[in-house]
Image (cartoon, rainbow, N blue to C red):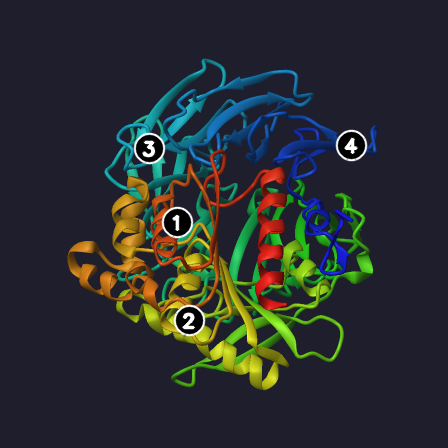
Amino acid sequence: MADKLSGGLSCARYMQIRAAYSATRSHDEKTMFFLSTMSAAPQVYRLCEAIPWPVQVTFFDDRVMGVYAHPTEPYLIVSSDVGGSERAQIYLVSHDGQTVENLTSDMAHVHQFGGFSSTGKQFVYASNARDDVHFDVYVYDLETRVSRCVFETDDTNYAAGFSADDRSVFALRMHTNVNADLFLVDIESGDALHLTHHQGDAHFSHPRAAADGRMVHLITDLDSEFARLATLDLETLALTYLTDDLWDVEQLEAAQGGKRLVYSVNEDGTSALFVLDRDRTGGARRVEGLPVGTVVDFDLSKDGAHVDVTVSSPLHAVEVWRVALDRGDVWRLTFASEGSVPHDSFVEPELIAYPSLDGLMIKAYYYKPKGDGPFPVIVDVHGGPEGQSTNLFPALRQYFVQCGYAVLAPNVRGSSGYGRTYLHLDDVRKRMDSVADLAHAVDWLCEHGNARRDAIAVMGGSYGGFMVLAAVTHYPDRFAAGVDLVGIANLRTFIENTSPYRRHLRECEYGTVEADGDFFDEISPIHHVDRITAPMIVIHGANDPRVPISEAEQIVEALQKREHPVEYLRFEDEGHGVVKLPNRIKTYTAIAAFLDRYLK
């Protein structure tokens, strides 16, 4: 039967498991809008008490990347790109979806929405419209339909909301992916106050202005291993920390003029949600009752009484839950289709740790199938490189587990979530130490994970795709197959050809062609294709602005010249990853068949 593969439900059926996320409440808080993959590409849906069934609001040909409810009127701001290009446009959409107006109308450039003013008359955004490379900050007047640049510098500046009196906007300047500053920019004069002077790497984000205009709440890892919640005095620029230096605070929202703060903490890859009332004693309270997993995002009601939380949970997929913060009640708001996949078939991963080449302990999530084994195993490597494999719901992993595969998701050195020192352990010339972490993962799998040594594959996307190619070239005896999604084959050409606005942000992690080109050539998989013994499958989108498709074509051409087993899927309507449902079904069905062929 067409619906069968590996003796169970098809991969296509698992790809039909839908997600609901990015909730935002209407101005009167009677309707919740959210993004969902219930259509072929993520679109906006609405849910209200009058119609207890989600109604689709947007019908773009391509994905919707963000949705934000207007604070005073029945409108939404919607962000969407074309073909995975990431050149997002900003649209004004009515609540019923009947009116859709492109406010930016510049398909050649990126537009990043940064928040509404309190009155809703203006919003702030950032764009690289001036010269492709640098991002400036703009304020858009919704009454006059006029946009005005308020912060123009030769830097990467993102928009981060308004001050309490709406007279200024916050701008986030990204020096690198791990080093950022906050500025407060006067809308009329353009004068910019540098709020976060510091030495070395430090990242500041999520500014939330208090109602009195004298302080701002934010997240920063200044002078610490982990990102902490803090308040910044706007007169003295002094910081006061509100959380301990134990785990990263990742997200923050404020209500009641900053008196109530809700924030999420990444505790060893599993999220915890906290509420902190600044006008009460007793400290922060942990929010109980949510599914165990990863908090993707959340939206706080204006009065701070309720929070809508997207949780990606191994046992509950990706759904939106509502919490009554004072009563403690928790209930589920969305019920995205699970595609007829039995709910009780989902498995939770085990958090494990294994030693690498220098004794460093590497954390990983291990998904195991039923039975005694030994198991064929897929080592699934995250991207970033500063990403992290967390305790979440990946439909593909659940599918593979039901097919009898075990899946190991390691957080090799350089991953986020384990402190500043760990994050920098793979920088530039230390790159191959992280690849060695993958080789040592195989040792742990064979000794403690009940794995078949002859049936271990490595799979990853983006930087994870580089790790796949590096693993099969530098450790060819460890891996029986490789799955490369939008991966880097040649560090030199990747740095040279990635989008201009991304290059300087990536060089701090990888190095520069001028200073490190010899090292790039030494380690890049494209120069070691002759070592590859594992069959390969390569997937890439033609519109990828991050890792150009030429990276895929280099490695595929080299393997084909060797007459080495390689399969190649190229998507003309995708970018950095595969988003559209028909393409996802095609991609992951091909991967499943490929792995069955070579591992089973």
Residue 133 lies, with reference to residue 102, above or below; the image says: below
Label pair 4/2, CB-CB below 8 angstroms: no
Q: Amino acid at mark 2?
A: Arg
Label 4 and label 2: CA atoms lie apart by 45 Å
In the rendering, at what x and y percent does residue 505 appear? 31, 50
Residue 580 located left or right of residue 433: right
Three-letter amino acid code of the residue under disc 4: Cys
Badge 1 is on which residue?
552
The quarter of the picture where residue 26 lies is top right
Q: Earlier in the sequence, mark 1 or mark 4?
A: 4
User: Where is mark 2, residue-wise?
Assistant: 413
- Percent coordinates x, y for residue 424 in the rendering: 35, 68
Sequence-wise, which precedes: disc 3 or disc 1? Answer: 3
How far is the residue under mark 2 from the one under mark 3? 33 Å
Q: Is residue 444 above or below residue 390?
A: below
- Image depth: mark 3 or mark 4 in front: 3
- Mark linked to residue 128: 3
Between 536 and 383, the one lying in front of the other is 536
- Residue at image x 44%, y 60%? 240
* Earlier-in-chain disc, 4 versus 2: 4
Label 1: few (<14), some or many (≥20) within 10 Å? many
Amino acid type of the residue that numbered disc 3 sits on in the rendered structure: Asn
Left or right: where 273 falls relative to 322: left
Name the residue furthest left.
514
Q: How many marks?
A: 4
User: Left or right: 111 with respect to 452?
Assistant: left
* Residue 455 against residue 564 in the figure, above or below: below
Circle 4 sits on which residue? 48
